[in-house]
């Protein structure tokens, strides 16, 4: 079994978002970085599948397209048990979904020519920053492989993968023949934390760096970013003392508490 997990370096989702002066990007000087929560679950699931097969039963690979600093996220994934990494190095500018997918497809084909096909390719359902939902589907289409998205359950069964999607009170189940591409959501599993020995091993694991060409022409253009405002607050004076009681009752009725 050979498994690939594609991840993206994104700002910590709990950090304070500050816009750059041109309002077309985030100011990242004071932000920490991680991989998207959905992708963390993809990394964990890949490690679990390989571990379930026993020692020497397969290989797990993590891939990212991003700036030189994205090696940090690759090392984090390898600290969790991923065997090796591929870094498609860019100048740090944002690529649209079409260009990102094309670069990943090229890297997948090159790796498969060198060391055999990937049985399963994991993507997060969407990244935590751009949230485009496109890359996994585009890669699957370009490779001519079946794809299921938004999964909360993944299980290898022989030469197929069982895929489960939440659907109201139940789940939709799909059986895809391998090789396949899947996109997964947070809640698929509970990702482990990297241990100190795991981080030490990750420092010795191989990272293949491929210098990508200049970013191709973009078919999507960022016009402007804005930070949504918080919920507004209102204060209404209802009176004082016992005379305010009727107004309080009427207010409670208006908001549905009485």
Image (spheres, grey):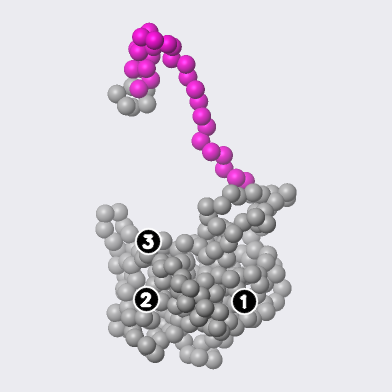
- x and y percentages locating residue 120 in the rendered image: 42, 79
Residue carrying label 1: 88
Residue 187 circle label: 3
Foreground tag (1 vs 2): 2
Mark 3 Cα shell of 10 Å, populated few (<14), some (14-19), many (≥20): few
Toward the top, the furthest residue is 243
Q: Is residue 33 above or below residue 121?
A: above
Residue 175 placement: quadrant: bottom left
- x and y percentages locating residue 200 in the rendered image: 52, 78
Mark 2 Cα shell of 10 Å, populated few (<14), some (14-19), many (≥20): few
- The residues bearing labels 1 and 3 have C-alpha atoms spaced at a distance of 28 Å
Instruction: Point out the tag, 3 or 2, that comes first from the N-terminus.
Output: 2
Q: Is residue 114 above or below residue 212?
A: below
- x and y percentages locating residue 136 in the rendered image: 49, 69
Residue 48 circle label: 2
- x and y percentages locating residue 35 in the rendered image: 52, 65
- The residues bearing labels 1 and 2 have C-alpha atoms spaced at a distance of 25 Å
Mark 1 in CB contact with mark 3 (< 8 angstroms): no
Q: Which residues are magenta?
A: 226-252
């Amino acid at each position: 079994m050979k498994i690939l997990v594609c991840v993206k370096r994104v700002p910590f989702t709990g950090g304070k978002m500050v816009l750059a002066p041109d309002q077309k990007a985030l100011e990242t000087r004071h932000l920490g970085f991680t991989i998207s929560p959905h992708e963390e679950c993809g990394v964990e699931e890949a490690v679990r599948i390989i571990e379930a097969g026993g020692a020497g039963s397969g290989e797990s690979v993590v891939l990212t397209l991003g700036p030189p600093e994205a090696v940090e996220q690759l090392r984090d994934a390898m600290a969790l048990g991923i065997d090796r990494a591929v870094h498609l190095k860019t100048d740090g500018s944002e690529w649209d979904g079409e260009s990102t997918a094309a670069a990943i497809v090229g890297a997948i084909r090159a790796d498969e020519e060198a060391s055999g096909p990937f049985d399963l390719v994991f993507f997060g359902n969407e990244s935590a920053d751009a949230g485009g939902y496109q890359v996994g589907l585009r890669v699957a289409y370009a490779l001519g492989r079946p794809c299921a998205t938004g999964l909360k359950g993944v299980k290898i069964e022989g030469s197929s993968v069982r895929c489960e999607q939440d659907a109201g009170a139940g789940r939709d189940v799909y059986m895809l023949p391998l090789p396949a591409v899947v996109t997964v959501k947070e809640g698929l599993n509970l990702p482990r934390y990297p241990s100190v020995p795991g981080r030490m091993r990750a420092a010795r694991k191989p990272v293949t760096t491929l210098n990508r060409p200049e970013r191709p022409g973009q078919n999507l253009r960022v016009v402007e970013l804005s930070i949504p405002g918080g919920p507004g607050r209102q204060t209404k004076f209802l009176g004082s003392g016992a005379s305010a009681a009727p107004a309080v009752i009427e207010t409670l009725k208006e908001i549905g508490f009485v």
